[in-house]
Image (cartoon, grey):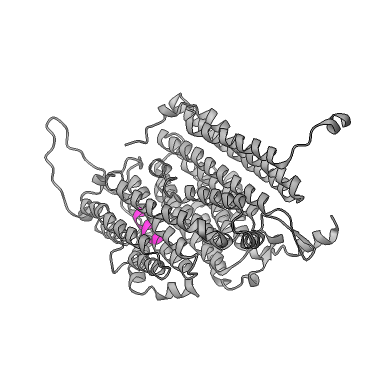
Amino acid sequence: MMTLLATAPFYGLPSYLFVSALLFAIGFFGVLLRKNTLVIYMCLELMLLASTLALVAFSKFNGTLDGNVFVFFVLTIAAAEVAVGLAIIVALFRQRHTVQVEELNQLKH
Amino acid sequence: MSTELLKAVAASNDWWALGPEMTLAVGALLLLVLEIFSPKKDLRFVPPLAVFTLGLTLITVVANFDKTWGGEALFGGLIRLSASGQIARVFFLVSSLLVCFLGTICLPRARVPRVEFYHIVLVVTAALMLLAQSNHFVMFFVALETVTIGFYILVSYYRERTLSLEAGLKYLVLGALSSAILLFGIVLIYGAVGRVVVDGVVHNGFEFGTVFNFLRANPDNFLATAGALLVIGGLAFKIGAFPFQIWVPDVYQGAPTPVTAFLAVSSKAAGFAVLLLLVRVFAPLQAVLVPVLSLLASATILFGNLSALTQRNTKRLMGLSGVSHAGYLLIGVVASFSQSAAAGAVWFYLFTYLLASMAVFGVMAYVAGPDDSGEELEHFERLAKDRPFLGTVLAIGIGSLAGIPPLAGFMGKLLLFVAAFQAHLYGLLAVAVVGVVISIFYYFGWIRAAFFESWSPPAPGTAPVIHPVAAAATWAGIATLAVLAIATVVLGFFPWPLTSWLLR
């Protein structure tokens, strides 16, 4: 394990930020373009995780621990959001028998 | 980490400063516990207990209004009590009291559990009050998410109605999207500021003071500017500013009426309380933020007013007209970059908006039948004849929202426009005046529906449509609506007590 860590190439802050920005963009466009509510929900979580990755990277390179601590808050909030969100999706599925966005459009006049 | 540091952090934990929020949290938990131990089906104590908790908290906040701990940061820099934070506390408590009042009208008509509604309203109120006093991005984000997740539940509260659930899903997806954008902005700011050591104490980019000092030294840092723009974008979702307003009409229509009022008043005010806080933090970025916010404000005013013109559904109408009010308030935020008095004007406008909107929503709650998401302007026909009291309250509320001279809404707009004039925002002022003129059309369409009978020939072969007659108001409802209407009229003639209190 130690040798593996020692031989691993050193990645700088920009590479972490690039991956984070990429994940954020995938999540963002997924929310806008996908039609299945559950997939949209996964994309939302992806956006939160992109922020988490950037947070950890910044925390490591800035030398302040607060970024790592904030990650726990973000994870807790994401968990609460998922609990409420899935409850709403399940309740809606029981009423309408669909999770496709284009069929959930009764609120349009 | 040395224990000295932990001791220093613990010494700044002044729990008395958070007394109001803790009272609300205890009250919220008490409701749930009492529900378990109360005999079945006898939950009449719940709304009075919630109102009592809110009222008690309001009295303590008003009695200790000047006790702000010298404006020092408490809890290791998480919280800073200030005069504007105290104003925000009073605002959110008054608003939640009125939401509970609307809840007592609407909830008994639907077959839904009631305790949880008041529980969540109390928790959300506490989080709103913490949000307005936060001094640290972690505190800010956690409080904001507590509010937002509470609202997801409240919007989809009628869980046997597809419209309410659909509104909840839309609010959930777009709310979570805006939260993620906001979080990414916070992370970028944290990364840009880095590690700052002042007098041997390590500071980081989550503290508002550190961020301000960093931005003052490096106003053209790309990462921090991008972060600030993302934070403002996330907040624009919450206040329903263009182009992030797409959720407003749908969510307002599907949500239960008390929740719509809560969203329209408290959620929007929370966005502006936070924007006024962040204007001071992001002040060195004026060169970027002022044009962006000005563009946002003018587009919001025009979009809100133009799209409200064609609406017949009253809740969508309130939502879209609320979008335009957010636009007027954004002008105040832009003005507060150079005129600190503009913050007082924004708060005065929010107070007048609170009184007028709650009066209108109260009347809407009485007029609506069991299904409150299909309420159209036609349902208000003959209201002035059948229920003259409700008709009068509606006219005063709508008049104040439109900004008709003797009413409070006019004074609110006047103060806001004066602040914008002093800040030399002439272009924005012109857009706002055009917006006010457009808004008079749809507001008066509503008043005409309530006061003047319009006869239209019944289409052949269809039965005449009979609209439900408005429910009779209880004495408590009449008293509350009367207080709201009288306050709206009195504040229009004598705004000075409130303005001098807000601007001191």
Q: Is residue A5 left or right of residue B123?
A: right
Work out whether residue B138 or residue B108 is closer to the camera in this orientation and state it.
B138
Q: Is residue B480 shown in magenta?
A: no
Work out whether residue B86 or residue B225 is closer to the camera in this orientation and state it.
B225
Q: Quadrant of residue B136?
A: bottom right
Question: Does B254 sit above or below residue B407?
Answer: above
Q: Is residue B357 shown in magenta?
A: yes
Question: Does B101 sit above or below residue B252?
Answer: below
Q: Is residue B227 left or right of residue B266?
A: right
State which region is magenta: B353-362
Question: Does B143 sit above or below residue B65?
Answer: above
Q: Position of residue B184 (x, y in %)?
A: 60, 45
Quadrant the N terminus of chain B occupies? bottom right
Q: Quadrant of residue B285?
A: bottom right
Residue visible at 20% across and 55% down in the picture: B451
Work out whether residue B27 or residue B500 is closer to the camera in this orientation and state it.
B500
Q: Position of residue B320 (x, y in %)?
A: 36, 48
Labels in figure, total: 0
Is the magenta region chiefly helix, strand or loop?
helix
Q: Position of residue B57 (x, y in %)?
A: 56, 63
Q: Position of residue B161 (x, y in %)?
A: 42, 34
